[in-house]
Structures are given as structure tokens and as C-alpha cells.
Image (cartoon, rainbow, N blue to C red):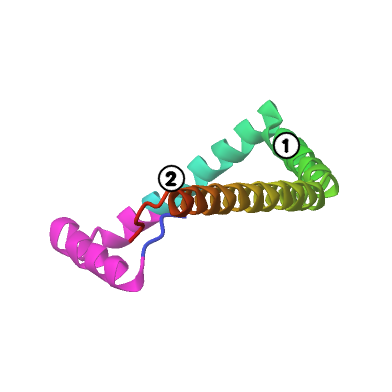
Amino acid sequence: MFNIGATELILLLLIAFVVVGPKDLPKIARALGRFVRYIRSMIEEVKRETGFDEVAKDIKAVEKSVDEGVRSVDIRPQMQKTQLEINKELNSVKKELSFKDFKNNATNHSTNNHRGGNSV
């Protein structure tokens, strides 16, 4: 509950022993135990009265159904197909552009040679 380790517990007991003294330490420990038990019972009573456990169960059920719904609606295959189509189109555009550039360069180069220009 409090997430206290063994070394922390020993340290707390030593401090309590020094502060309270050995005579009253068992009385204090019993009173502290009763207090913790009382607080736990109050927390449980509040949970029961407010229906906290039922609400928590309902939320978990809704979360589970949403997770299942998300898993059933998997759009990855559609996204992969669309990505493939886009890549094909991009590749064809790249080929077309590189062919046009090659053709333009070849035309410009041959035009310069026919005019007697030096191309170096």
C-alpha cells in the first residue's frame, strides 16, 4: 500500500523507538494498526456506496470493446496498396522527366554541333 521496503521499515522502527521509547511502542503500533484498518474500511465503504467498482468494471469493458473494434478495422492493407500506387506513379513521372531531360539535352547538343559550335 505504502510501498515501503525492509530498510525503510527498520529505519522507521528505530526512529519510533527513539522518539516514543520502548515502553509505549507496542501501544503506538496497535493504535497505528487500528487507524490503518479504519482508513481501509472507510475507503471500501466509499467505493461500495459510490459504485466505484462497477464504474471501473464498465470502463474496462468499454476499453476492451474499443480495442477489439480498432483491431477489427485494420486499414494497413489499404494504406499499403495506396502507397504502392503512389510509388508507381512517382516512378513513372521520374522516368518521364528523366527521358524529357535526356531528349532535350540530346536535341540541344545536336543543334550546337550542326551550327558549328564547340561543345566541350
Q: Residues within 10 Å of mark 1 (few under 14, many from 20)?
A: few
Q: Residue 5's image quarter?
A: bottom left
Q: Is residue 9 magenta?
A: yes
Residue 87 is tagged as none
Q: Which residue is mark 1?
A: 59
In the foreground, 55 or 5: 55
Amino acid type indicated by mark 2: Phe
Q: Is residue 7 above or below residue 39?
A: below
Q: Which residue is mark 2?
A: 35
Provide the major secondary structure of the magenta segment.
helix
Q: Secondary structure at mark 2?
A: helix
Q: Is residue 66 magenta?
A: no
Left or right, residue 113 beside residue 71: left
Taking the view exactly as shown, the residue that stands out farthest to the top is: 50
**Between discs 1 and 2, the one toward the N terminus:** 2
Residue drawn at 22 percent across, 67 percent down: 11
